Image: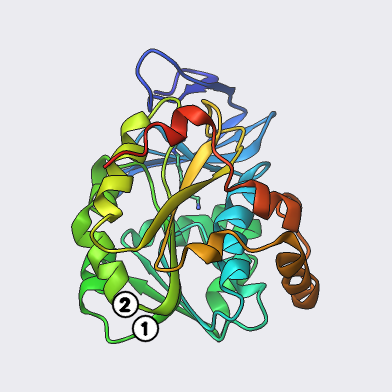
Amino acid sequence: MIQQFKFSETLHSGYAQTFEVREVLFEHRTEHQHLVIFDTPSFGRVMALDGAIQTTERDEFIYHEMLAHVPLFAHGQARDVLIVGGGDGGMLREVLKHPGVERVVMVEIDRSVIDLCTHYFPNHSQGAFDSPRAEIIVGDGVEYVGSTDRRFDVVLSDSTDPAGPAEVLFTERFYSGVKRCLKEGGIFAAQNGLPFLQADEVTNTYKRLAGHFQDRWFFAAAVPTYVGGIMTLAWASDDKALRQLPVEVIAERFRAGGLKTRYYNPEMHVASFALPQYVVDSLVD
Ligand code: AG3
């Protein structure tokens, strides 16, 4: 909802964050969703889709670093990476920081998100869409994972919430497609909402991953504009040890990669798999 100089998120019922708005730069109903981009004094430029904050200039690094680097450093030798969603380019930027990654396929359903973010959020992609290592496909992520011949070391789902176009990215059909196009030893990680306010998401994802992966868990990141406590990021693989690597192993990989980060570090990596008890209690089959 946009009032004259304020934007209030409409994602949660009865509870919302509100931004003072300096200027609305773009508002449009795309083929898939309602999109608005505005400038704020508190978080810089902000994009909301269907009333939910997706990204801000000021705190985007937290989400993008964690969703990219935790699975990539846990894997240790990822060469082929798939991003589903990710139209703002922040995830692609972080994945490409890994020198060992040879190819990143990004499948985004809404071309206008890519185009608008390239223009309005150039610091998200920082040229990543033009990288020779990146292949951008405008299409349906569920269909892609269900039909591609490509195989990936890491699959990342950088989606909106499970209502609207991204609902399918929280279904068993999607998870079975992800499993199908992961190489042996592969890792899947995905945006999975705020467990305090969206408790069903953790429970549902945990159940729906069950038939497809030996190991399911979540890791956490505190992103100020995803309000409501920690965000959980879903984690799935066939090898539990991948989320229990000692900090020394992660630190060695991090050092060798030579990445500059602002939230992620090896200690945060290891700690992110520790979950509050109310989240652990919601992991039931
Ligand atoms: N994708 C995750 C947005 C989640 C917002 N939802 C919420 N607060 N529950 C963001 C896209 C960034 N590349």
C-alpha separation, residue under disc 2 versus residue under disc 1: 5 Å
Percent position (x, y) of residue 222? 61, 37
Residue plotted at (59% across, 59% down): 244
Relative to residue 13, is residue 73 drawn left or right?
A: right
> Element type at marker 1?
loop
Residue plotted at (57% across, 33% down): 225
Relative to residue 260, is residue 229 drawn left or right?
A: left
Q: Amino acid at mark 1?
A: Arg
Colour setting = rainbow
Percent position (x, y) of residue 256? 78, 77
Query: Which quarter of the image is occupied by the C terminus?
Result: top left
Q: Is residue 58 above or below residue 15?
A: below
Q: Which residue is mark 2?
A: 181
- Whether residue 265 is visible, yes or no, is no
Q: Given contact means CB atoms under 8 Å apart, are the residues at marks 2 and 1 in contact? A: yes
User: Crowding at label 1, few (<14), some or many (≥20) Cα neighbours within 10 Å?
Assistant: some
User: Crowding at label 2, few (<14), some or many (≥20) Cα neighbours within 10 Å?
Assistant: many
